[in-house]
Amino acid sequence: MKKISRRRFLITSALVGGGVLIGYSATRPSRHRLANTELAQGGEHYVTSLLKIEADNTVTVYVPHSEMGQGVHTSLSMMAADELDADWELVNIEQAPAIDLFANGDIIEGFASEFGVPSFLEGLISVSAIKVAELMNMQITGGSSSVRFTGEFGMRTAGAAARQMLIECAATRWGVAADECTTQLSYVHHNASGRSLAYGELAAEAALLEPPEDPVLKDPSQFNIMGKAISRVDIPAKVDGSAIYGLDAKPAGMLYAAIRFAPVFGTKLVSVDAGDALNRRGIKRIVELEDSVAVVADSYWRAKEALKLVSSVFETSANDNTSSADIYAGFERSLADENGSKVIEEGDTEAAMELAADVIEGNYRVPYLAHAAMEPMNCTVHIHDDKVDVWTSTQDALGIKARVAKIAGIAEDDATFHHSYLGGGFGRRLPFNWNVIDHATLIAKEFDVPVKTVLSREDDMQQDYYRPAVASNFKAAFDAEGNVLAWHNRFTGPVQTPGASHIPYAIINQSIRVVDGDTHVPIAAWRSVDHSQQTFFTESFVDEIAHRAGKNPYQFRMELLQQHPRHRKVLEVAAEAAGYGQNLPEGHALGIAVQESFGSIVAEIAEVSIGADNQPVVHKVTCAIDCGWAVNPDTVEAQVESGIIFGLTAAMYGEITIENGRVAQNNFPDYEMVRMATSPEIEVHIVESGEALGGLGEPATPPIAAAVTNAIYILTGQRVRELPIKNHDFSRVNPLAQV
């Protein structure tokens, strides 16, 4: 029996019990009162905890999420400002500090709803979510959840509540009914008398009111800011170089640490020979930790160069001879020998297989992948005077703050987190996926000055928490007319995102089960999590089924998606825009894939040819996305483009291999990226269904691999069942008739 984590325990407790939490939530002061008590200075007034209005009529929106290039600071502020009816030109945006007041409980509420929590528990979750988030030290950015959960449930509500409070104050001053008042561009108006008051004139009075529990949100027809393509507020600083990332932290007196980890995961440090390292200029100390050794110096370069002189011995382990081939062989044994755990069991798949006129099989696998964030992993820690300061780029400021405080032996209230931009996250910069945090804190405990620990690109590539390698085996059954009777799927875990292996297609008999896929390689969430593997598997095998049935892959999907009109619509839009079924340049083919993830539905069509080097060339990707509705169309387009490039890199080149128990890759020369010269044209079409908001940071990543490999099959007759594509030989071409 696996030990349940504190995080999972707290979530579970909130969902099934929560009596204490209900009482706490019901009786505590409102969060805007806490904001005014803890944060307000001078003439500042927090009308809600997320909104501050000053006498000069400026509005400050506090965003409790990290900005890592996804534009979330802009989008979330747009949502609050629009509901407030604020003048966008008077809106300032600030990163919310890492304090409990800004724990993002809206994410807990959102995911609880998404995972199908019974309706009778919804009220309990709503009142408990904030407290649970506080207990979990959760100020997390991930799961494509910021806009669809914090934005929808938090920022819009905060803006609407503040607007209602300001109207109430103005109506009271004028002695009129609140429903006679309107708002526009940071003013409350009483049209009948022609009177107006600026929000800044009302803020002090409004801050004394209790926010309404269920303020009325705007209908989309009333939006003034949401729905417009507004430039991201973080761009100017990133262009002129003034943006501050974790790596830019330079507190006074800072030292630098370079670190060497155990090359085989899970092994411990046995001995260290400093050699001549301590005699080098600027070297302060060699620090030995349980699984690593570090050199601390007055510059990172000196520390890194001195570390080369340090000899270290790590213990041997049973994994010292393990290779990727061994890992895949273990996966296949598990798939052959274990029935696994149920994901979906519908109908009678085994009976359908026995009665089938035809059965098709396909075995797929994908490798481990690194996060390869642009900004190297880093963390600066200063322990002093029974306090601790931490500077780093993270997706969970509260979580990092709590973790550093615990390791340092300091009370959480005496820990200060210094926010910065993130040079890429993708799951790597979560506290439980980030080994540098622990090591940086332990190293800093040896000094009375700040110490910055930096992982080199090589360190980060070889000491990541990787996207899991996964194997997935399929069978499908047909009747005599070529109709699909059954879908049979067995894959290796772990399951990080429930539902990723599900298919939207109308196949009556389905059996999907997962078997153990644990290895000694550390794993974590990677952009789009399980969807990145599973969509390649499922959308590739759907294509196999379509071709086996002698049907056009597009029409085949459309026929099986009758119960999913949103999927059909994005497919239709993408196909029409890509010119599907029309004449293509000689030697070009179109591949299709569609997937729902994180509340959004994405269809992608890749136009591909085989180049002179017998490798695929992706010329164009046409994408249609239904994310409910677009808060900022500019951000939607940018995130889709980013997700496609990220996924295309993984599909074409991405591969972490294990040799002698350790990672073979070192840096970008052997972990290749899609570059500007090899990047395809990307065309994005936003399909607004008006449904609930979906995520943006991840949903465009999963479909691209299958879209490309499905096109390759049409061009070559070769089915790519294992990524990356670069490892395949396409010199023997047997193209299919265009479909």
Image (cartoon, rainbow, N blue to C red):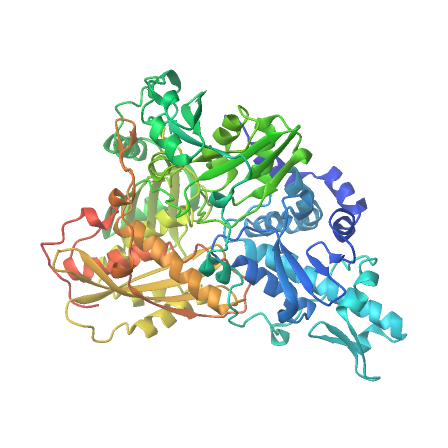
Q: Quadrant of the C terminus?
A: bottom left
Q: Is residue 397 left or right of residue 84?
A: left
Vertical arrangement, residue 164 with respect to residue 486, above or below:
below
Q: Is residue 2 left or right of residue 126?
A: left
Query: Which residue sits at x=34%, y=42%?
Result: 369
Q: Nearer the viewer, residue 260 or 608?
A: 260
Q: Quadrant of residue 677?
A: bottom left
Vertical arrangement, residue 27 with respect to residue 281, above or below:
below
Vertical arrangement, residue 24 with respect to residue 503, above or below:
above
Residue 657 x, y percent position in the rendering: 27, 36
Residue 219 x, y percent position in the rendering: 64, 72
Q: Is residue 399 left or right of residue 20?
A: left
Q: Nearer the viewer, residue 585 or 22?
A: 585
Tag count in the figure?
Answer: 0
Query: Which residue sits at x=62%, y=48%?
Result: 104
Residue 581 x, y percent position in the rendering: 25, 73
Any part of residue 626 in sight: no
Query: Which residue sits at x=62%, y=56%?
Result: 94
Q: Nearer the viewer, residue 174 or 341?
A: 174
Residue 227 x, y percent position in the rendering: 54, 71
Q: Nearer the viewer, residue 487 or 409?
A: 409
Q: Is residue 443 left or right of residue 154?
A: left
Point out the residue furthest to the front here. Answer: 281
Any part of residue 71 in sight: yes
